[in-house]
Amino acid sequence: MAGDADLARIGFLLSDRNRAAMLLLLLDGRPQPVSALMAEIGISASLASTHLRKLQDGGLVVVEVSGRQRLYRLASPVAEAIEGLLLLARPGPAKSLRQATRGRKLREARVRYDHLAGSLGAAVKSRLLELGWIDLLEASRAVDLTEAGRRELRGRLGVDPA
């Protein structure tokens, strides 16, 4: 018989700044090799591998093998969970201009798998709702394109709604 969800385990995995940084780097949906993650964060290969193993064991990342390379990406529900946590987390101090720029861009506009996210994505969604081009579906956060939206996309923008 299963007990309550083990949120403490997820909290433990997120509590290490190196692991959290790896998850943020993987948020754009592109699979990354250990070498790219370790270089970006500034840790050794062995430490990066240890953290990735913990994240994989915890179900937060998955590994794809491409030739001799092991590529890491977020497990499917993890990106949405991190998006939610980013709403709660205050930005930490940047250690470099590169990190500050990446953090700003991550908050403003990011592409998550198949859609625009971040504050830009939220602004686009709000404007499309105002225009009546999309409707919110009940009992979910999903949206549906309205007939007016289809007409405008096809006519004004030349975009196939399909």
Image (cartoon, rainbow, N blue to C red):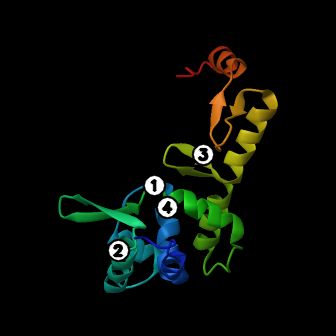
The mark that comes first in sequence, 3 or 4, is 4
The mark that comes first in sequence, 4 or 1, is 1
Determine the residue positioned at 70% across, 19% down.
152
Residue 46 sits in which quadrant?
bottom left
The mark that comes first in sequence, 2 or 4, is 2
Mark 3 element type:
strand
Cα distance between the residues tagged 4 and 1: 11 Å
Q: Are marks 2 and 1 in contact (CB under 8 Å)?
A: no
Residue 78 tag number:
4
Residue 29 tag number:
1
Determine the residue positioned at 34% across, 72% down.
35
The mark that comes first in sequence, 2 or 3, is 2
How many residues crowd around disc 3 within 10 Å: few (fewer than 14), some, or many (20 or more)? some
Q: Is residue 120 above or below residue 84?
A: above
Q: In the image, 47: left or right of 106?
A: left
Residue 116 tag number:
3
Q: Amino acid at mark 3?
A: Leu
Q: Amino acid at mark 4?
A: Val
Cα distance between the residues tagged 1 and 3: 12 Å
x then y, percent, for residue 5: 51, 71
Q: Are marks 4 and 1 in contact (CB under 8 Å)?
A: no
Of all residues, the one furthest to the right in this rendering is: 130
How many residues crowd around disc 1 within 10 Å: few (fewer than 14), some, or many (20 or more)? some
Q: Is residue 94 above or below residue 28?
A: below
Q: Amino acid at mark 1?
A: Gly
